[in-house]
Image (cartoon, rainbow, N blue to C red):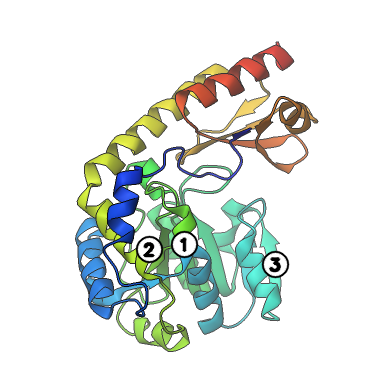
């Protein structure tokens, strides 16, 4: 089965590195506060963000949960878009309004979710849109899960406002999705409020050690990101002329419109992709041979 439906990194960490990471921590102890602090300092250098306002989370989903908990009022979410913010808000009994992605900054409410780069449409919100949202909402959460593939930091140039928070993850570019590690980039005055809502030891010791190892091998991450960007652009070029529309995505996936039933036809060939609505598809950039199998199959179906 070729799995191109979950936006995961197609390459795993080497077995030798896994053994080194697993043996570096005591499994009978709670995660080390020193290890967490050390990782946050190094992450701050990488992200160009003050370490005292970085909070680690159990994946990006916990970051979404925490921001929803500390906010109030109506929650505005993207449709189409990542479903977790809507599911969490409804589970907490919050009023939720799905809105077209580009319209979100212009609406008003308690909490707005901006996905940048957007999943699945692939565009990025600019500085003016994020700033406008901050004026219209009590809190703005900017989900930057795919930012490394955009070759820009979405938070650069954004005014220092405590109601704008950015979240990221180690699941995409970093390739450690199964270990569930995310982070929140906050500002003075809001970090303490988030910590009050945070559970004890939300990040496990293996995740801390793995992220530290990855930061020590940053060139490997950059090499993989560059390969994915190159393959993404190749997929876009190959799809143009075959499908109805190809979106200019700046993430680790390509989104396109084509005839209904394509997802099911590909599944019969053991190739999995994501469908958001009838005819709107998203394919994750995989290994070159996986991408080639997808392109070969779709050319046969649509030519």
Instruction: Identify the residue at image location x=26%, y=59%.
Output: 212
- Quarter that holds the C terminus: top right
Which residue is pictured at 55% across the width and 68% down the height? 112
Give the side of residue 290 with respect to residue 130, left or right.
right
Task: Specify whether 303 is left or right of 296.
Answer: right
How many angstroms separate mark 1 from mark 2 (CA)? 7 Å
Above/below status of 37 relative to 233:
below
The answer to which of 260 and 102 lies nearer the viewer is 260
Q: Position of residue 95 (x, y in %)?
A: 70, 76
User: Where does residue 125 sit, x and y in percent of width and height?
Assistant: 46, 51
Considering depth in this image, is 44 or 121 the residue closer to the camera?
44
Q: Is residue 53 above or below residue 22?
A: below
Whether residue 119 is situated above or below residue 287 in the rendered picture: below
Categorize mark 3 by other alpha carbons within 10 Å: few (<14), some (14-19), many (20+).
Answer: some
Rendering quarter of residue 21: bottom left
Residue 275: x %, y % from top left: 70, 40
**Residue 207 shows which numbered tag?**
2
Sooner in the amino-acid sequence: mark 1 or mark 2: 1
Look at the numbered discs 1 and 2 and tell me whether their residues touch, using CB distance below 8 Å. Answer: yes
Verify CB contact (< 8 Å) between mark 2 and mark 3.
no
**Residue on which the image places disc 1:** 180
Residues under numbered marks 3 and 1 in contact, where contact means CB atoms less than 8 Å apart = no
Residue marked by disc 3: 97
- The picture quadrant where one finds residue 103 is bottom right
Residue at the image position 38 percent from the left and 56 percent from the top: 127
**Distance Cα–Cα, label 3 vs label 1:** 28 Å
> Of marks 2 and 3, which one's residue comes earlier in the chain?
3
């Amino acid at each position: 089965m070729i799995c191109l439906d979950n936006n995961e990194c197609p390459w795993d960490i080497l077995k030798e590195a896994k053994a080194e990471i697993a043996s570096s921590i005591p499994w009978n102890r709670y995660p080390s506060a020193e290890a967490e602090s050390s990782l946050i300092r190094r992450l701050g250098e990488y992200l160009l963000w003050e370490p005292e306002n970085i909070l680690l989370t159990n994946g990006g989903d916990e970051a979404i949960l925490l921001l929803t908990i500390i906010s109030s009022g109506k929650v505005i979410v993207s449709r189409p878009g990542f479903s977790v913010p809507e599911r969490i808000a409804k589970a907490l009994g919050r009023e939720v309004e799905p809105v077209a992605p580009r319209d979100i900054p212009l609406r008003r409410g308690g909490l707005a979710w901006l996905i940048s780069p957007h999943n699945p449409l692939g565009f990025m919100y600019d500085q003016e849109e994020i700033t406008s949202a901050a004026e219209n909402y009590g809190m703005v959460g900017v989900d930057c899960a795919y930012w490394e593939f955009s070759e820009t930091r979405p938070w650069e140039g954004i005014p220092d406002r405590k109601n704008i928070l950015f979240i990221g993850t180690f699941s995409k570019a970093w390739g450690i999705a199964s270990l569930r590690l995310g982070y929140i980039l906050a500002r003075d005055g809001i970090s303490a409020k988030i910590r009050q809502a945070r559970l004890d030891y939300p990040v496990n010791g293996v995740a801390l050690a793995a992220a530290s190892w990855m930061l020590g091998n940053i060139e490997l991450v950059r090499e993989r990101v560059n390969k994915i960007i190159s393959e993404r652009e190749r997929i876009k070029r190959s799809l143009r002329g075959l499908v109805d529309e190809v979106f200019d995505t700046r993430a680790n996936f390509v989104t396109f419109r084509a005839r209904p039933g394509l997802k099911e036809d590909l599944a019969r060939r053991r190739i999995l992709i994501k469908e958001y609505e009838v005819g709107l598809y998203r394919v994750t950039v995989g290994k070159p041979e996986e991408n080639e199998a997808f392109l070969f199959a779709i050319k046969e179906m649509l030519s």
